[in-house]
Structures are given as C-alpha cells and as structure tokens.
Image (cartoon, rainbow, N blue to C red):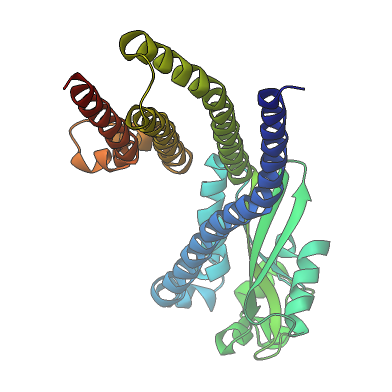
Amino acid sequence: MRIPLKVNLVVLLVAAIGVELFGIVATPFLDNIARAEVLQKARIMMEAAAAIRAYTSNEIAPLLNTSIVGSSFHPQTVPAYAANKNFALLASKFHDYAYREAALNPMNPANRAVDWEADIINDFRASLHNGELITERETHNGRVLNLSHPIVSAGPCLSCHGTADQAPLSIIATYGTQNGFGWKRDEIVGAQIVSVPMAVALEHAARIRSVFIGVLVGVFLLLIVLFNLLPALMITVSRGDERTGGVMNPRAAAAQSIKAFGYGLLAAGMVVVLVVYTVTYASKGLAGLEKALDPFTLSNYASLTAIVPGLLTIWLAALLKSHTRVGAGN
C-alpha cells in the first residue's frame, strides 16, 4: 500500500474517531446549556408570578376587603387567582408554558394537586429541598422542565383557611365547608409550579452540535486535500525551477518549503475564520451572522487576522525566492 494512501486512511480514521468523541462529549454539554436556558425562562416566569401576587396582596386586596366580609366574594383579592389568570393569558399564545398553584387541600377543586404535583409538595414538606425544586418530566409534547417553590401558609391565609366557623361568610357561600380548611401557620400547603417546554432549546442545541460536527468534518477533509495537493504543488514548482535554473540550490529549496508551509498556515487560518462565523451563527442566529459580516464594522475584521500568518509566510517565501534568483543571476 502506498504511503499517501496509508496516511489518508489514518487521517480518515482519526477524523471518524474525533467526530464521534466530539458528539459524545458535546451532547451532554449542549443539553446542559439548553437546560440552563429553559431554567432561566422558568425563573423569570416565577418572579413575574411573585410580583403579581405581591401586587394583588398589597394593592388590590385592601380595596376589596369590605366585599369579602360582605355577602359576595371577589376572587380578584386572592393572589393565586391573579397569578393564574395572568399566566392563562400567556398560555393562550405559548401553549406549552404553564403556571400552577397546586395545593393538597385547596378550596377550589381546580387547584388540587395531581400525582406528580403532590410528590413535589410532599418533597417540600419532607424538607428535601430548600425553597426550590427543579424536575423534568416527559409529556405528549416532549420533555418539560418544572421549577417549583413551596407555598407556606402565613397569618393572613388563616383568616380564610383556618376553621370553617371563623371563615368569612362569602367564602363559605362560594366554596362550602368541605375543602380548604384546617391549614396551620407556617405549614407547606402547596407549591407554585412553572412548566416550560425544553423542545425548542434542545432542538437549538442539536442544531449547534450538527453545525460544529459539519465544521469538524470540513477541517479534516481540508487537511486531507492539503496533504494530497501540497506535494503536487511542490513538484510543479520544482520542475519550473529546473526548467529555468537547473538544479535547485538550498535557498530555493528552503523557499519552496516555506511557501508550502505558508499555504498550510493560510488554510488553517481560513478554517479558524470559518469556525468563528459558524459559532456566531450557532449562538446568535442569522441576524448575528449578518452583523458579523457587516463590512463597515471594523471589529468584524479581527477574525481575519487568522489568515495573516499564512499570507506573511507566503510573502517571505516569495521574497527569499526572489533574492535567490538575484544571487544566481549575479
């Protein structure tokens, strides 16, 4: 077997192993990035819910307190009601996003915890998690991340949820006396649960992984092409030198080697530039790539410095070759 063929086979084997190892290493890494992105969205939603609850408690409830002790009940005074209503509007546009305030013993049966929600509440009750629980579950729409915070019954809660005989008549008239009573002070009675789909983030991570694998394959293919073309280029140059000047002197041979090395550096620099723009596209999308290619932004030319060493090496080789010719002429 010829040596170039052996080298090509070795490079192909190394490329296959390298791409496979990259896929194995990159998959959990990129999935963790996707999970962190989804978790950030969930935390924003949770903080929004907390803000809505605080606004309802501090601004709306005091205005309607007189109605609570009267004959009618206004659910707008309940912080959970306000938060659920706001996120119901969000869910009308983003169908897979959800917010729930689930309880083991709620007044409103619609807020009763289902199995997996009850598990979260019981975990909080067992003090297995300090103020926050992050879980994932599979649904018919794909994997969903759940961010949960405990709901602790404070003093104001017991005015309605303590005992049925002390609850406002409007509450009794609306919900009856069977559910939502018997809460204890500082007891974990439920959980705020934000559910955010992971499908989009995981697809983005998979797209980034595919782009990087494509670039990696391209780099190895370029190396194979360079390995096969550079010797041919050197032979062509040496034949030209033989026609014009006979036997090649050492300086001319050195210039030829430097020139070949310069072409290798130039190709490597072009790969670096390609990787930079690939990373830009993968992280910022098409808009980010268009901005990175803007010819009127000077900072965009920084990545082109990667091809400067190759160009300088080729220029130095040409300069050395010209001096060799001048010396030979003299």
Q: Residue at horizontal 46%, vertical 44%?
A: 283
What percent of the width, then of the height, locates residue 14? Answer: 69, 39
What percent of the width, then of the height, locates residue 153? Answer: 63, 84
Quadrant hosting residue 296: top left
Q: Residue at horizontal 41%, vertical 40%?
A: 276
Quadrant position of the N terminus in the picture: top right
What percent of the width, then of the height, locates residue 264? Answer: 44, 32
Observer-nearest residue: 245 or 52? 245
Side (left or right) of 318 relative to 148: left
Quadrant position of the C terminus in the picture: top left
221 relative to 308, above or below:
above
What percent of the width, then of the height, locates residue 226? Answer: 52, 26
**Residue lying at the far right of the rendered structure:** 115
Residue 113 makes an appearance in the image: no
Side (left or right) of 268 relative to 129: left
Side (left or right) of 210 relative to 259: right
55 relative to 167, above or below:
above
Observer-nearest residue: 266 or 286? 266
Q: Residue at horizontal 56%, vertical 50%?
A: 88
220 relative to 186, above or below:
above
Quadrant hosting residue 163: bottom right
Total count of labels: 0
